[in-house]
Image (spheres, grey):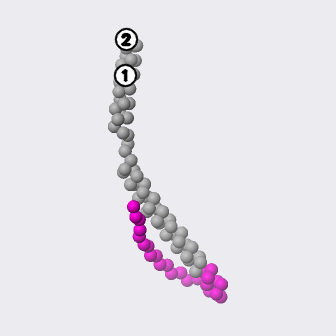
């Protein structure tokens, strides 16, 4: 399975710039904030979709197991009714 895609986000924010160092700090903060937002959005989409797919593929109970359980239940009930009579 191949999974691919792209995402583009843009933000504008006015921040004080006193020298080159403060400009670098401001850009770093913007990049980190945007990275966190994008990561959380991807996490919600990717893991939410994966959970939906796994839930759709997972069977509730195999039919042979259900039939076996029903047969055992009938046998126990018949033995119990025999002893109670």
As drawn, which residue projects farthest toward the bottom?
A: 19
Q: SS of the residue at dot 2?
A: loop
In the picture shown, does residue 55 fall above or below 47?
above
Region rendered in magenta:
1-26
Residue under label 1, please give it.
75
Q: Nearer the viewer, mark 1 or mark 2?
A: 1
Indicate the position of residue 47 as horizontal and vertical percent values.
45, 59
For the point 55% across and 76% down, which residue is it?
A: 31
Indicate the position of residue 10 as horizontal and vertical percent values.
47, 78
As drawn, which residue projects farthest toward the front?
A: 1
For the point 38% across and 30% down, which residue is it?
A: 69
**Most common secondary structure along the magenta stretch:** loop
Indicate the position of residue 48 as horizontal and vertical percent values.
43, 58
Residue under label 2, please give it.
85
In the picture shown, does residue 45 fall above or below 18?
above
For the point 59% across and 78% down, which residue is it?
A: 28
Label 1 crowd bin: few (<14), some (14–19), many (20+), radius 10 Å: few
Q: Is residue 13 left or right of residue 47?
A: right
In the picture shown, does residue 12 fall above or below 55?
below
């Amino acid at each position: 399975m191949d999974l691919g895609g792209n995402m583009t986000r843009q933000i504008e924010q006015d921040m004080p710039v006193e020298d080159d160092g403060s400009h670098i700090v401001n850009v770093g903060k913007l990049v980190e904030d945007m990275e966190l937002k994008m990561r959380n959005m991807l996490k919600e989409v990717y893991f939410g979709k994966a959970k939906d797919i796994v839930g759709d593929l997972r069977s509730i109970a195999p039919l042979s197991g259900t039939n076996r359980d029903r047969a055992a239940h009938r046998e126990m009930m018949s033995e119990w009714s025999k002893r109670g009579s």
